[in-house]
Image (cartoon, rainbow, N blue to C red):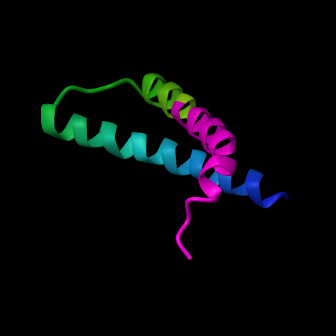
């Protein structure tokens, strides 16, 4: 697998899981339950968005890394 694709997919997983952590914190603080289908749908959307964004922005950010 191409390293760029692999990195993008991993960023998508990180984005989706980060959303799930945030929604869990929201539920714990407010006591307001959020339905599982809503959580899953938004987590998938965030994951896909993070994957696409990281894939598109990787060439632009590559030159900005410090040695």
Question: In the image, residue 35 lies at what x, y percent?
Answer: 38, 24
Classify 6 as above or below 65: above
Q: Quadrant of residue 19?
A: top left
Question: Residue 51 colored magenta?
Answer: yes
Say whether residue 51 is left or right of residue 23: right
Classify 22 as above or below 38: below
Question: In the image, residue 57 lies at what x, y percent?
Answer: 63, 43
Kindly identify the residue that appears in the image at 56 percent across and 77 percent down: 67
Note whether residue 9 is visible.
no
> Farthest residue in the left direction?
30
Question: In the image, residue 23 lies at what x, y percent?
Answer: 32, 36
Question: In the image, residue 18 lies at what x, y percent?
Answer: 42, 47
Kindly identify the residue that appears in the image at 64 percent across and 57 percent down: 62
Question: Residue 23 colored magenta?
Answer: no
Bounds of the magenta span?
46-67
Residues 29 and 64: in front is 64
* Magenta span main SS: helix
Say whether residue 22 is left or right of residue 42: left
Classify 10 as above or below 52: below
> Farthest residue in the bottom direction?
67
Kindly identify the residue that appears in the image at 59 percent across and 45 percent down: 12
């Amino acid at each position: 697998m191409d390293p760029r694709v692999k990195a993008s997919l991993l960023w998508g997983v990180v984005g989706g899981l980060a959303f799930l952590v945030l929604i869990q914190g929201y539920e714990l603080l407010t006591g307001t339950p959020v339905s599982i289908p809503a959580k899953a749908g938004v987590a998938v959307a965030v994951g896909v968005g993070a994957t696409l964004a990281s894939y598109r922005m990787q060439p632009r950010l590559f030159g900005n890394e410090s040695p």
